Image (cartoon, rainbow, N blue to C red):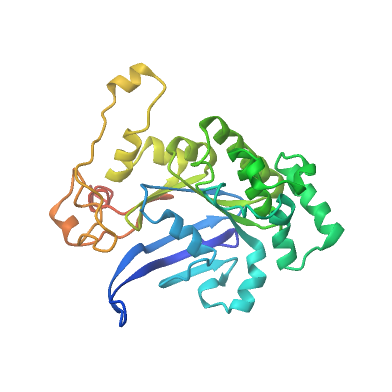
């Protein structure tokens, strides 16, 4: 996907965390391959859902995109500018355009600061507003996310989990960003509150024209909020397409296994459908298997899967997949 409509472009992104040994003279003995050769685009105004098991690298992708982590290799283009080659001083100006909502609302808010100080901190750091002007802006932001503007002098411990996450959303919106990484913003909340936060994010997107990377475990929630869905396994994206195609016609065996675990609120359909049970454990990202990362657990793995890593290619219009079996079936003449 190319053109002026693309806001974020990720090309062959890698993020390795070094493994060292030795207390005095530490030496590099290996790497944890948290993100290993990931590529995708995010179009202006859309929501790209990123799903996968815990430890597959979803959060690392989001944090690397906004440069909280510096990538090991690859390129990240934001509105045509390569963030991986940018100086810290230039990156500081660009940070106003991209923000993040963290997963845990109980850990991401400083308990020693008032709500006004937490939400107003970005305004002060970037010298956007001070004093009375900053307080007015903070009150507007609180009202925007559904909180009473008179809460500015309260502390985080006085709020529920859902209210704290709304404070986190207000902080992310303080500098009028275009792009927000939503790092599992609902996973730490009660089920009854999750829908409220998702509805708030959708409302804000329509009102402010925001672009989201929505990272989550809940496949049904991702389908609800996302325009396209990327499925990740052990540091790699294995499938990417629009939400309806991924859920109605999953091609990669891992995607099929994930979706088979999602309960369907229809007892007749639920009784007839086949559950795919994956055997074995997820390999360590410090020592991934040769060939396809999923080959050790794949129920339809072939010999080539254990030898050659499949390319992530477009097998159907707008539908990308990294699987030797799928690619062989989609070749002309098959």
Name the side, left or right, on which 212 lies relative to 128.
left
From the viewer's perspective, is residue 94 above or below residue 285? below
Indicate the position of residue 242 as horizontal and vertical percent values.
46, 44
* Residue 272 placement: quadrant: top left
* Residue 201 placement: quadrant: top right
* Residue 151 placement: quadrant: top right
Residue 316 can be seen, yes or no? no
Residue drawn where x is 61% and y is 52% of the image: 109
Indicate the position of residue 317 as horizontal and vertical percent values.
42, 49
Indicate the position of residue 139 as horizontal and vertical percent values.
79, 48
User: In this view of the protein, which residue sits in the foreground, 101 or 303?
Assistant: 101
Indicate the position of residue 62 as horizontal and vertical percent values.
49, 58
Residue drawn where x is 82% and y is 63% of the image: 130
Residue 191 can be seen, yes or no? yes
Residue drawn where x is 44% and y is 66% of the image: 11
User: In this view of the protein, which residue sits in the foreground, 224 or 314?
Assistant: 224
Farthest-out residue, top? 268
User: In this view of the protein, which residue sits in the foreground, 245 or 81?
Assistant: 81
User: In this view of the protein, which residue sits in the foreground, 75 or 114?
Assistant: 114
Name the side, left or right, on which 34 lies relative to 294.
right
Count of marks placed on residues = 0
Residue drawn where x is 19% and y is 45% of the image: 280
Farthest-out residue, left? 303
Farthest-out residue, right? 132
Name the side, left or right, on which 57 lies relative to 283.
right
């Amino acid at each position: 996907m190319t053109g002026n409509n693309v806001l974020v472009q990720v090309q062959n992104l890698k993020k390795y965390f070094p493994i060292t040994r030795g207390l005095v003279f530490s030496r590099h003995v290996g790497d944890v391959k948290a993100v290993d050769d990931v590529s995708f685009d995010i179009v202006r105004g859309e929501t790209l859902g990123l799903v996968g098991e815990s430890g597959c690298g979803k959060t690392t992708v989001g944090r690397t995109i906004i440069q909280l982590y510096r990538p090991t290799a690859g390129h990240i283009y934001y509105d045509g500018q390569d963030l991986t080659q940018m100086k810290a001083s230039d990156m500081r100006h660009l940070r106003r355009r991209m923000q993040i909502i963290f997963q845990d609302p109980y850990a991401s808010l400083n308990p020693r600061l008032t709500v006004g100080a937490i939400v107003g901190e970005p305004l002060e750091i970037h010298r956007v507003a001070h004093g009375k002007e900053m307080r007015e802006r903070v009150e507007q932001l609180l009202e925007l996310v559904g909180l009473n503007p008179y809460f500015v002098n309260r502390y985080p411990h006085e709020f529920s989990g859902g209210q704290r996450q709304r404070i986190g959303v207000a902080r992310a919106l303080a500098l009028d960003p275009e792009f927000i990484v939503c790092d599992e913003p609902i996973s730490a909340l009660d089920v009854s509150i999750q829908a409220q936060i998702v509805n708030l994010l959708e409302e804000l997107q329509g009102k402010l024209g925001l672009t989201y990377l929505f990272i989550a475990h809940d496949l049904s929630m991702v389908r609800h909020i996302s325009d396209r869905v990327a499925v990740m396994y052990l540091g790699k994206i294995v499938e990417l397409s629009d939400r309806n195609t991924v859920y109605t016609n999953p091609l990669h065996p891992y995607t099929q296994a994930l979706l088979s675990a999602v309960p369907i609120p229809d007892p007749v359909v639920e009784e007839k459908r086949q559950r795919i049970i994956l055997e074995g454990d997820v390999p360590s990202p410090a020592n991934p298997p040769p060939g396809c990362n999923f080959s050790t657990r794949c129920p339809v793995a072939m010999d080539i899967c254990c030898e050659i890593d499949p390319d992530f290619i477009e097998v159907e219009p707008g539908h990308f997949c990294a699987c030797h079996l799928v690619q062989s079936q989609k070749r002309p003449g098959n």
